[in-house]
Amino acid sequence: MKKYRIGVDVGGTNVKLALVDLNGKIVYSNTTPTRADLGYEHSIANIQNAIEELMRETNTNKDTVEAIGFGFPGQIDYTAGIVRLLTNMPGWVEIPLAKIMEDKFKIPTRLDNDVRVATLGELKYGAGKGCSNLVCITVGTGIGSGLVINGKLVRGAKNAAGEIGHIKMTMGDGPICGCGDYGCLEAYASGPSIVAEAKEYIKGGKSSKFKELATEELSPYIVAQAALQGDAVAKRIYAKMGEIIGLGLTSVINLLNPERVIIGGGVADAGDILFNPIKETIAKRAMPIQAKSVEIVPAQLGNTAGVIGASLLIES
């Protein structure tokens, strides 16, 4: 009897679900709205309905599905199976989701932070394949990371390891971060930082390419497109962001000596205009042994990393 796992990637807008075989291949997938605005009970019911639909469509059951795994954008207690806090999803506080799902489906269930989940996917089936020591970061609205040391995912004493976005880049002042502190890495270099910097240039009349491309709202993607089309201001913004991210990563690389740093997330789709300054900064600023032994590579699994990684939680 062939065995499968279900991976669930929960976002603020949509929930992605997939039936994944034991070789990491997605054999079926679907999506359902999160509807976080209607409260966590409604969202959980939606997810349960979507899992039931997946199992009907694939003719699977508790005998053929050996585990369900969830990735969430927030604070997750992997050990207890509890969603501690999802800041962008009201009401998701101290929810014992693993128990709720196990009571419903009679299938072992695990949950973790979405970046750690994506790290598991990249480690086994993506850009981290064959590595024992790596750092996987996502650069989007914020900057998150998953850490693997000696082949094991690092969660920390309270399941809170990997907050690379909150490495302090200054001694005192600096831009205020969403966490409430000042001078965090993600306050300097993330999607909102790119947009804010671009808007400042527009105010000063420095880039017509932004205005030409921004038919709707300005976004990191538009700034990246302007850079790829040769806009000097956009190139300068991405060079600065790459240097800042590279500087933040230098501290992590010096500390952990990983073989590979994997970079994913929406902002990383900019490609070489972001990756080149990251690599150059690490080569200049990291300790020689660490700098020479690390590769900086893009993530490979794209938007499937979440569901594939979630399917692996049972073995992590």
Image (cartoon, rainbow, N blue to C red):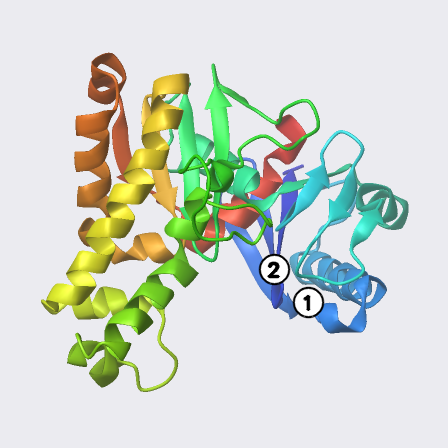
Q: Is residue 245 left or right of residue 94?
A: left
Mark with earlier residue (2, 1): 2
- The amino acid pointed to by label 1 is Thr
Q: Do labels 2 and 1 touch, CB within 8 Å? A: yes
Percent position of residue 70, x then y: 67, 46
- The residue located at (59%, 49%) in the rendering is 179
- The amino acid pointed to by label 2 is Gly
Disc 2 to disc 1, C-alpha distance? 7 Å
- The residue located at (71%, 51%) in the rendering is 60
- The residue located at (56%, 40%) in the rendering is 117
The residue pinned by badge 2 equals 11
Quarter-of-image position of residue 251: top left
Front-most of residues 186 and 301: 186
Q: What secondary structure is marked by label 2?
A: loop
Q: Is residue 168 above or below residue 35?
A: above
The residue pinned by badge 1 equals 34
Number of marks in picture? 2
Quarter-of-image position of residue 131: top left
Percent position of residue 209, x then y: 17, 78
Quarter holding the C terminus?
Answer: top right
Tell me the crowding category of disc 1: few under 14, some 14 to 19, or many 20 or more residues within 10 angstroms, Cα based. many
Q: Is residue 148 above or below residue 68?
A: above
